[in-house]
Amino acid sequence: MKKLILTITLALVVTLTSYAQPPQAFNYQAVVRDNSGEILQNQNVGIRISIHEETTLGTIVYQETFSETTNDFGLVNLQIGNGTPTIGTFTGIEWGSNSKFLEIEIDTAGGSNYTTMGTSELLSVPYAMFAEDAAVADDGDWTTTGNDIYSANSGKVGIGTSNPEAKLMVKAPNGFIGNSSLVKGLIIKDGYFNIGNEFEILDYYDNPRFRVLDNGYTVVGADSKGIQMRTDGSAADIESLGTDLAINYQTGNNTLLNVTSGNVGIGINNPSQKVDIRGSNIVLYAENTSNGNYAYLAGTQQGVNGNSQTGAGVIGYSGNYIGVFANSPDGRGLYAQSFTDLAGDFAGDVNITGTLSKGSGSFVIDHPLDPENKLLRHNFVESPENLLIYRGKARLNSNGETIVELPDYFEALTKENEATVVLTSIGKPFLSGYEWESDFNSFKIYGEPGRDVSWVVYADRDDPVINELGQPVEEEKGPDNKLCDKGKLLYPKAYGYPETMGRNYEEMVKMKRQIKKE
């Protein structure tokens, strides 16, 4: 790019009279030349003007751009203050404070790829505009200290009114008090609040919008529709002055919090439950990092009802203890149901302290011969008895005998005197028999010398746990039955009954309605 030479030929000083309104601009004139000193005639140029505070590299308090065309003499004429502002406003420049420096940048292609031509201090020219603030003489009612101003007036001060009703009264058909860039927009301090001596902010029609009462309350809004707040040093009170308490925080049309008619809603305008939370992501997340503490939800019917249309209704995670804990003294600690998928899916070990009741059971693994494409399932062996099975092989000695030793706990765990042994000869059949030893922890097998025999022991459990939790083979349905009431079925479809006969049909319908709401 060619090096540019910007020659300033004239800066026109703004002239003021004592009666004229000072113009909010000043003239600037320059000749544009290339690095050879040749004038750039009739060429579009882009110019950016910046006014710095205090130093040549100080804060830019005002910046504007121009798109100009040089004349036959390479001359451009500007009115600084009438360009296109990019930073600040020209009228907002405080000419009376600190030094000001003018930076000129130019793009000879007429665009915005500017090259700086230098920065120089502004001296007296723009300061003529400062005379606008000096046209009125000081009558001594106000005193300035640094950037602050105050009045020692013992009467009342009115802004927008000639008849102030309080120490400070601001009245206007439109307007505001305060500035968001200030740390404190407005401070009003009264030496002592007593009965009848309260601070109020009224609207144009004299309706109260904000009040500080002598009893310590701060009131926002009218008496019939507002709220009042107070703190006594130990607790904060928020009271509704209307019939309902509603606290709303809204972004667009999405209510984040709404309290009305005794119900609390998060993500919903009209909560139907005591706590009604709606959302597209995780709607409730509770975490406690202290030992021995947890999130607790309780109810007379359901402590937690977790519904999800596509994912998990309830997710629980724990680093080293319990992710989800459910307890019910009279009902179900945990109830899970799925309309199209698994009601429960456990990845890891599962422990049940109590009785497990099921319609069928099996193990399912990846098929050993084709693990990528098939599953292999084996069903449980069922019995009306609580059977234990022990099995093995034995070789008979030269006398045609052998003794089989059972585990030490066999007698404590089973009805040992009712246990049975099934013997099967290996190879050519031969006669065999057995008899229990007196301690019932071993038995002797008789048969053909030197031959092998397989044996199976069947015994009923007889330990304290099975005696406490054991269930009858047949039992009546009814209100005392934990599994099913009379007139209901565990598996109505299997017996040709409609699904309305299912024991959980009402609960299923309730869940479906809840999901449709969401």
Image (tube, rainbow, N blue to C red):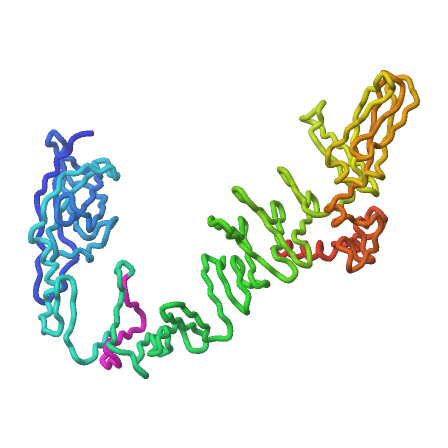
x and y percent of residue 23 in the render?
15, 59
Which residues fall within the magenta stretch? 160-179
Could you tell whether 320 is left or right of 349 in the image? left
Q: Which residue is at the far front?
A: 438
Write down the quadrant of residue 409 in the picture.
top right
| 468 or 226, nearer to the observer | 468
| 466 or 296, nearer to the observer | 466
Q: Residue at x 88, y 24 (%)?
A: 446
Q: Residue at x 49, y 60 (%)?
A: 257
Up-down relation of residue 3 to residue 98 (above or below): above
**Can residue 402 be spotted in the picture?**
yes
Magenta segment includes 422: no
x and y percent of residue 125 in the render?
8, 53
Q: Which residue is at the far bottom?
A: 196
Quarter of the image that includes the C terminus: bottom right
Number of numbered labels in the structure image:
0
x and y percent of residue 392 in the render?
79, 26
Q: Residue at x 13, y 41 (%)?
A: 75
| 33 or 310, nearer to the observer | 310
Could you tell whether 472 is left or right of 69 in the image? right
x and y percent of residue 88 in the render?
23, 52
Q: Residue at x 45, y 61 (%)?
A: 249
Up-down relation of residue 8 to residue 246 (above or below): above
Up-down relation of residue 421 to residue 402 (above or below): below
Quarter of the image that includes the N terminus: top left
